């Protein structure tokens, strides 16, 4: 036996190195690495020669230069004078803004659609199926352009005639504006209470969890921290709001004739604008003048329409609308019909004589068009509006003019024909006569607590106050949410179906209602299956937000491509973009791994 | 003594429309309310949609620009080239479906495409003089292929090669290869566009297949250098959106290859970006398949004396790929939709044509524009193809028994 073993040994030990798997693997890797290094070397060499030839920036020093890119939607203060770095950062924040809201909404709609897909009701089931199949199979790019260019741009009325939604929301073709809560200059008094409430809430949660564990019973944890937080924060808010007096150094500088003013604080360094301070503006009597227009809104022609800035009926004692030239209007037979009192009216001629406005009467039968360019005057008495100053301390009102009294005007013309509205050689006289025609307004700075609700107004032709979402943002958000919700719905359906029937049957046998069965037995188990793919859908949504260029929304990729076109810094921008997206992906995969670890079944 | 037996109550009907209604729509008061509410909403939506499509919409601009939608600026007199490629494709599909018989996945897809080609043939005969004969020819090629496939099912084994020849020959024919000649003259790729370009870019999934398999095998490799290179490539590419890669490719490819920016056509840059992007996703799909093959398969193959390469190619890969075919079809649907992003590099694909048509002077004459019509039209076309693929994918899943345990 022993001799045999020794006889075989030499043939086994010596394997030539070119046939040894271990050496071969190492060699193959060395060759591979060398090839890669060589390839990268050649490419880098190409890039550097090309860059030096075309004199393009290859480092990040351009980031501190002045960007000069106007951005419509900025979560933080930004002007085109700021640097490229800040512009790109604003873009990154805009990406997060659409991604976070999108993820929340897509989850809600997705779960709803997923549950609808399994409904016992044929109609509900079919609608959900059509929704999923239709939206999953149409490119997102098409959907974004569809919502943006085909629906949201043309269809809602113009800013001059916005749709008033419940809750003070206004929707128009420049976007959606909603009342919003902002922290005021008094917020500092409340902040310590908030921090304390947060700490106490955490403490209450831990205490409750420990006490449950100690007694080894099942119970709800969340009411304890919530209650602690609400009580402490509420008491703090009450205490902080006790002093509502206006600081002595605070003032409001308002030019009624120009329709704008600024809330300021007098400091040693000069006047500092103060944001989010409510002020009351009262104007005894004033006028607005507009001329009628023929417009195209959506697919409709709107004829002979007169649009004043948005005024609400309760904001003034009286509104009176009249023609600028009453005799001519009488001669032509014009009448006024309010579409929405007192801001939108239609001029018509009562041809059928029933004393009311009927469709078609706003069109001139001779020309086939509306009555264009007819002057209309809106006289407002006792106007009063509470306005919250903006982030820059600005307050804007409609461009009211001094009411013109016809007789007084004629007298004035006769008395001093040359003095009106001009600088005479002496100067003095002209200034006096303009001050008499200056619009007078009473203003008052109102006291305020730590928070203030800012309502939405339309002083001239844009939203003012509240929080504003551009139509670009809405279109992108809508498309991303709807597209992703179809995928999430399908995942949710799969997850619910994957929970074995026995679970439902057992729950029913225990006497749980169908809602309890779903929310306590089926859904928690489905969640385990559903969450990982849903999180990768969240990542997809975030990455897909880079299609924002189709809706004109300035997010990371859009701003980066503009910067790249302006500076020619292709390589740094490419690195920056890849880095940002990898950071986002990494963040998502960290969350995913955490979720997977927490959801993993504990097996015995 | 003898009494009549009480008549039994009439049996409760278990079929019929009323029963169906009660079971599916009005099974409980809650369900009845739900049915009425959703029914009203659905009716409202459908009514308004129909009102728009059949009454309010002005489809004239869509109809007038069919050539742009189809091929963009590809010359009128050379339309026979893309249509010949389509004819060969329908012929090959016909052979495949004729051989595999009715009801198979290929046959179902083939009949759907034949339906589309049939509609287009009728439209061509009636309205489009430049392709009056060509579209019917495509239809005839499909029919002939089908008959041939039924008569000679064994032809199928040569089809893989036929498809490869079709792909490369087709691209060559599209480009043209005799400069200066009339019929085979070169058509520069900047004139390609519309749905033709969308399909050309979609073929980027073919080269992504071998690259993706190589990356997946590399990722599963025990050699750290290769493994981490592949992981790095796959994760970096998948971490950022395609639109960014297209943008970067259009900026950097000329620099990296040290070429004049104009000598590298945009279509090449987009093709490279699409192929590599698709390859990274393909690699992840294939990896899923590789992990699904039981270890015993590879071990048994080695025990039989197969070499490492033989084990991979003959035993592991065929099983792995079979398991992930549905996932790959899903990826193909995604890529088909994503080709719409090439507008970022200045290519005029189907999606971009819609944008161009919607801002033509004639379109702006229509009150309110024609954006809604134009984008509805391309949405329907994209949907037809993507939905067709997803139906095929579902049938595949059923036939392969994937996901059924």
Image: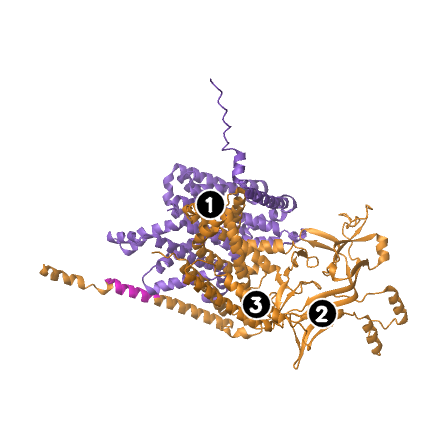
Q: Which residue is mark 2?
A: A260
From the image, tell me which residue sits under label 3.
Answer: A233
Q: Residues within 10 Å of mark 2 (few under 14, many from 20)?
A: some
Viewer-nearest residue: B179 or B91: B91
> Where is residue A505 shown, x and y percent of the image?
43, 45
Q: For the residue labelled by badge 2, is the local secondary structure a helix, a strand or a loop?
A: strand
Instruction: Answer whether residue A31 is magenta in the image.
Output: yes
Q: Of discs 1 and 3, which sits in the foreground?
A: 3
Residue A347 appears left or right of A4: right
Q: Relative to A304, does residue B126 appear above or below in the rendering?
A: above
Picture layout, residue B158 above or below residue A457: above
User: How busy is the neighbourhood of tag 3: few (under 14 within 10 Å), some, or many (20 plus)?
Assistant: many
Residue at figure coordinates x 26%, y 64% from the top left: A22
**Residue holding disc 1:** B391
Residue A78: x percent and y percent?
60, 70
Q: Are marks 1 and 3 on the same chain?
A: no
Drawing shade for chain A: orange
Q: Secondary structure at mark 1?
A: helix
Toward the front, the furthest residue is B1
In front of the other: B278 or A493: A493
């Amino acid at each position: 036996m022993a001799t045999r073993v020794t006889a075989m040994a030499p043939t086994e030990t010596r394997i030539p190195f070119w046939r040894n798997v271990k050496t071969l693997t190492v060699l193959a890797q060395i060759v591979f690495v060398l090839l890669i290094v060589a390839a990268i070397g050649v490419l880098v060499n190409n890039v550097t020669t090309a860059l030096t030839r075309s004199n393009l920036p290859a480092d990040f020093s351009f980031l501190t230069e002045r960007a000069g890119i106007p951005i419509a939607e900025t979560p933080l203060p930004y002007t085109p004078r700021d640097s490229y770095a800040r512009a790109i950062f604003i873009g990154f924040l805009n990406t997060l803004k659409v991604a976070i809201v999108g993820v929340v909404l897509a989850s809600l709609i997705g779960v709803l659609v997923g549950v609808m897909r399994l409904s016992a009701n044929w109609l509900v089931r079919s609608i959900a199926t059509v929704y999923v199949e239709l939206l999953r199979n149409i490119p997102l790019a098409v959907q974004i352009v569809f919502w943006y260019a085909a629906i949201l741009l043309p269809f809602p009325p113009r800013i001059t005639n916005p749709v008033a939604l419940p809750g003070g929301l206004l929707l128009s073709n420049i976007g959606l504006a909603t009342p919003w809560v902002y922290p005021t200059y008094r917020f500092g008094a409340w902040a310590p209470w908030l921090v304390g409430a947060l700490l106490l809430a955490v403490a209450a949660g831990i205490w409750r969890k420990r006490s449950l564990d100690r007694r080894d019973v099942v119970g709800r944890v969340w009411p304890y921290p919530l209650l602690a937080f609400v009580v402490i924060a509420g008491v703090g808010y009450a205490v902080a709001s006790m002093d509502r007096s206006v600081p002595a150094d605070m003032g409001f500088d308002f030019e009624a004739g120009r329709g704008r003013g600024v809330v300021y604080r007098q400091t040693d360094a000069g006047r500092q604008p103060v944001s989010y301070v409510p002020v009351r503006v009262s104007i005894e009597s004033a006028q607005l003048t507009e001329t009628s227009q023929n417009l195209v809104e959506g697919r409709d022609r709107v004829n002979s329409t007169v649009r004043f800035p948005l005024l609400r009926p309760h904001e003034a004692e009286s509104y009176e609308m009249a023609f600028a030239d009453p005799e001519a209007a009488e001669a032509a037979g014009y009448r006024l019909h309010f579409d929405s009192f007192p801001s939108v009216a239609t001029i018509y001629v009562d041809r059928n004589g029933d004393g009311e406005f009927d469709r078609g009467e706003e069109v001139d039968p001779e020309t086939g068009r509306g009555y264009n360019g007819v002057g209309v005057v809106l006289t407002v008495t006792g106007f009063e509006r509470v306005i919250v100053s903006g982030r820059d301390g600005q307050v804007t009102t409609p461009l009211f003019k001094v009411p013109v009294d016809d007789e007084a005007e004629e007298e004035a013309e006769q008395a001093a024909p040359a003095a009106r509205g001009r600088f005479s050689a002496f100067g003095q006289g002209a200034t006096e006569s303009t001050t008499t025609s200056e619009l007078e307004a009473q203003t008052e700075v109102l006291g305020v607590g730590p928070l203030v609700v800012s309502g939405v107004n339309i002083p001239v032709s844009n939203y003012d106050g509240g929080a504003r979402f551009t139509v670009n943002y809405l279109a992108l958000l809508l498309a991303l949410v709807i597209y992703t919700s179809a995928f999430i719905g399908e995942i949710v359906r799969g997850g619910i179906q994957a929970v074995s029937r026995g679970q439902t049957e057992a729950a029913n046998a225990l006497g749980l209602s169908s809602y309890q069965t779903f929310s306590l037995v089926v859904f928690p188990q489905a969640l385990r299956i559903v969450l990982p793919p849903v999180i990768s859908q969240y990542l997809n949504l975030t990455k897909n937000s880079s299609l924002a260029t189709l809706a004109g929304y300035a997010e990371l990729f859009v701003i980066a491509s503009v910067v790249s076109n302006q500076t020619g810094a292709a390589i740094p921008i490419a690195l920056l973009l890849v880095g940002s997206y990898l950071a986002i992906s990494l963040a998502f995969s960290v969350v995913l791994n955490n979720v997977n670890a927490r959801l993993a079944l504990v097996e015995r | 003594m003898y009494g009549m037996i009480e008549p039994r109550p009439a049996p409760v009907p278990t079929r019929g429309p009323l029963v169906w209604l009660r079971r599916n729509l009005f099974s409980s008061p809650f369900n009845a309310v739900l049915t009425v509410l959703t029914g009203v909403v659905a009716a409202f939506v459908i009514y308004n949609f129909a009102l728009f499509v059949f009454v309010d919409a002005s489809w004239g601009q869509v109809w007038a620009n069919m050539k742009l939608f189809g091929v963009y600026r590809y010359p009128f007199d050379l339309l026979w080239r893309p249509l010949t490629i389509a004819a060969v494709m329908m012929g090959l599909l016909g052979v495949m479906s004729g051989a595999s018989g009715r009801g198979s996945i290929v046959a179902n897809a083939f009949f759907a495409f034949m339906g589309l080609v049939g509609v287009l043939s009728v439209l061509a005969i009636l309205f489009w003089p430049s392709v009056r004969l060509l579209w019917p020819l495509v239809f005839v090629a499909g029919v002939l292929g089908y008959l041939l496939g039924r008569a000679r099912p064994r032809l199928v084994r040569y089809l893989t090669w036929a498809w490869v020849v079709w792909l490369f020959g087709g691209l060559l024919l599209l480009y043209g290869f005799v400069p200066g000649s009339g019929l085979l003259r070169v058509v520069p790729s900047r004139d390609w566009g519309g749905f033709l370009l969308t399909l050309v870019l979609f073929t980027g999934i073919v080269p992504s297949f071998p690259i993706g398999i190589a990356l997946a095998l590399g990722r599963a490799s025990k050699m750290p250098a290769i493994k981490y290179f592949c992981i790095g490539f796959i994760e970096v590419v998948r971490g950022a959106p395609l639109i960014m890669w297209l943008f970067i490719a259009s900026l950097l490819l000329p620099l990296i290859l040290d070429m004049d920016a104009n000598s590298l056509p945009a279509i090449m840059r987009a093709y490279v970006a699409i192929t590599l992007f698709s390859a990274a996703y393909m690699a992840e799909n294939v990896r899923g398949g590789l992990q699904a093959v039981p270890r015993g398969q590879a071990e048994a193959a080695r025990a039989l004396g197969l070499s490492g390469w033989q084990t991979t190619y003959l035993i592991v890969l065929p099983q792995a790929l079979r398991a992930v075919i549905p996932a790959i079809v899903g990826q193909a649907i995604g890529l088909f939709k994503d080709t719409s992003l090439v507008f970022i590099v200045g290519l005029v694909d189907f999606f971009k044509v819609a944008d161009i048509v919607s801002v033509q002077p004639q379109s702006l004459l229509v009150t309110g524009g024609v954006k809604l019509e134009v984008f509805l039209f391309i949405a329907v076309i994209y949907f037809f193809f993507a939905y067709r693929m997803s139906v095929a994918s579902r049938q595949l899943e059923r036939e392969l028994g994937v996901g059924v345990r």
